[in-house]
Image (spheres, coloured by chain):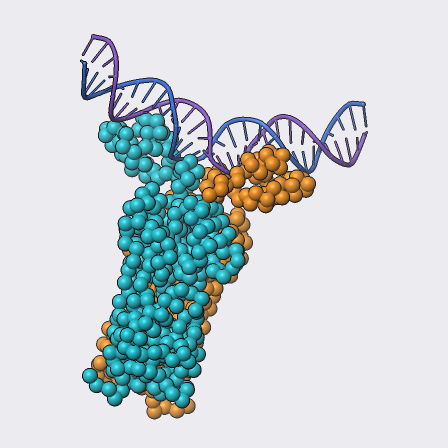
Chain colours: A orange, B cyan, C blue, D purple
Amino acid sequence: MQKQATINDVARIAGVSKRTVSRVINGSLSVGDTTRTRVEKVISELKYSPNTQARGLASSRSYLLGLIYDNPDALYLDDVQRGVLEVCSNLGYELVVHPCRYRSETLVQDCLRFMQRSKLDGVIVLPPVSESETLAQALKDSGSPYVRLSSVALDEAKHIVVSDDRAAAAEMARYFAQLGHEHIAFISGPQRYKSSTERMEGFQLGLSAYGIKLRTDWIIEGNNTFETGIECARQLLQAEEKPTAIFANNDQMAAGVLKVAHSLGIKVPEQLSVAGFDDNMLASRVIPALTTIKRPVRQMALLATSKMIMSIENNDKAASNVAAKVAPTLVVRESTARVAGSSD
Amino acid sequence: MQKQATINDVARIAGVSKRTVSRVINGSLSVGDTTRTRVEKVISELKYSPNTQARGLASSRSYLLGLIYDNPDALYLDDVQRGVLEVCSNLGYELVVHPCRYRSETLVQDCLRFMQRSKLDGVIVLPPVSESETLAQALKDSGSPYVRLSSVALDEAKHIVVSDDRAAAAEMARYFAQLGHEHIAFISGPQRYKSSTERMEGFQLGLSAYGIKLRTDWIIEGNNTFETGIECARQLLQAEEKPTAIFANNDQMAAGVLKVAHSLGIKVPEQLSVAGFDDNMLASRVIPALTTIKRPVRQMALLATSKMIMSIENNDKAASNVAAKVAPTLVVRESTARVAGSSD
DNA sequence: AACCAATTTGCCACCGGTGGCAAGTAAATC
DNA sequence: GATTTACTTGCCACCGGTGGCAAATTGGTT
């Protein structure tokens, strides 16, 4: 347990003041070349690395980023986290993860407390927490850099990265229509989340371009879990009149649909087309592999983190220049097919 | 952006010295009841919360824990992370996540640097990184609290939480044998990881109790991914002579086996029994749902974190007293059945 | 040689807490 | 009532850096 070298050690050995060492560390320009080289040599010899706590105390920087979320899908979180960490580690930041409860009335307070307790340099907020306008406002007021991931553009470009779920859902509608489906059901996510309503509206809009209207009793609300996917699918598939295609708000619920179809002896995709949304690992594991919408989650995470760090390293307009919108894409696999009896 | 209250504000308003406020915050015993109450009142009125950086600087505590891992399965990581965070948030710690590369020659250096840069109070190390003895030794030498999660007891009780994968694999062997299987194949994980060899040995041991010996050409090494599961399954199922049961080192690979079986028209479980290991979300999503071994991942995470924090809050023997071993259990679902043609 | 501007360096206070020790106060003992 | 003992409280240095400003150095001018 050898003791850690301090800035004083470096200063003493290099024969300069610690202020100068500090300048070298922070890349200040006003340091003579010979001095700089000498100091750098000592730093590397001693394997000196500045104490971030002391640094933070003096300069209000922690090199810590926060990731705030509420009970996300494991696969989604993993994707995001990997993306964020990739940028972090390249740029010398660490990531502190922080679950919270979106519907708690102390959400704002919890998050602010988290930020100031750990003296975070900034936070990235995932859906659905990112949909809270009171939180966004509080973050803005607190002056801390933040970036939200969302399906809707609800903030200035510098504070958000959005995926156009509406357009993606419309594309799925078009795809279904072109396969000849007319009896289509939709299993939505919780209607209190904008991402859910966006997808639903996009889907309806897309269908209406083909003159197809979603029957209201074929729009069923789940909560994005496999289990509710099963429940919703039962309602749809045990009824007298069945849809020929089901679009679920995410892959988990689509997997639930596959499960029910299988247990009822309904063949997918021959008798029923099923599609999901996300394109996470699950989509390719199940049988048949799911047709779905690929959300560029990782890319969103990379963009968000870049924005974040630009914002921190005091260049807000640069942050705004990082792309703020990404387009999900349709991925066709085995779970969808031309409607039985039709040909094209 | 209202300014944060400091300890001085609290002291001034409460009419005491800041040292006394500090004592109240840290729950020191030698503070008079009336004084304590008064100070606590001011603290809550001001919503004062101590600056962790200053605190850390003065006392070498950061209330930050680290989680070190290398490219784990998303579902496994999620389980662990949730468990760790649950304990953290109850006890006032935050969690910093840190991916690293197990096989890098700078692993030890990276991890130590991470710890001292962020001044972590302790780290939890996941497999396979947890299997590095050089890292464990370095952590021990550095004097920082650490806990490893592993499938093998390779450290003192206070530094490790192990799951008895060997026994669990043996139980699977027994189960297979009792179903009448004799032609059994095993898809192993990378043999360089102890967890893989433990499971394999446990399985072999279990089978040998029934006089069954694994044919060496029916032991195939994958790398725990779905894709290699597929490759290995192809080798096994496209051969002239096929096994009647396949045990895969994890659920991902077992899912790959299901995929191949389906594409070859082999019925599971009628013609082939398939089992995995982990019991993650995937196991129940696929069709047929996988028989598998449930690893109590969350419980391990809880135990590890408790140990960690006890160790930090200077009570090493208490840390040793927290249970260090958990038992995985067999979960029977739909992917396994009595071997065709046998009855019992 | 004297002077001035520009650049490089050093000094010292300060960030917001905690540790050690001394001082103050109240209760207990003789 | 005086003295001892135990308990509370306050003072000040210190943790390891950074910011502001003054001092020192450098080089170019007149």
Residue at (29%, 33%) from the top-left corner? B28
Q: Position of residue B287 (x, y in %)?
A: 31, 78
The quadrant of the image that shows the C terminus of chain B is: bottom left
Q: Position of residue B50 (x, y in %)?
A: 37, 38
Residue A87 visible in rendering: yes
Horizontal placement of B129 versus B207: left or right?
Answer: right
Quadrant containing the N terminus of chain B in the rendered view? top left
Q: Quadrant of residue A34?
A: top right
In the picture shown, does residue C14 fall above or below A231? Answer: above
Above or below C29: residue A14? below
| Relative side of A247 to A159, left or right | left
Picture coordinates of residue A159, whole percent (x, y): 45, 55
Q: Quadrant of residue A251?
A: bottom left
Q: Residue at x 33, y 83 (%)?
A: B183
Is residue A303 visible in the rendered structure shown here? no
Quadrant of residue B81 within the rendered picture:
bottom left
- A50, above or below B344, in the image: above
Up-down relation of residue A284 to residue B133 (above or below): below
Of residue B283 and residue A294, the one placed in the foreground of this image is B283
Q: Is residue A14 left or right of residue B101?
A: right
* Nearer to me, A115 or A178: A115
- Count of marks, rendered view: 0
Q: Is residue B142 left or right of residue A212?
A: right
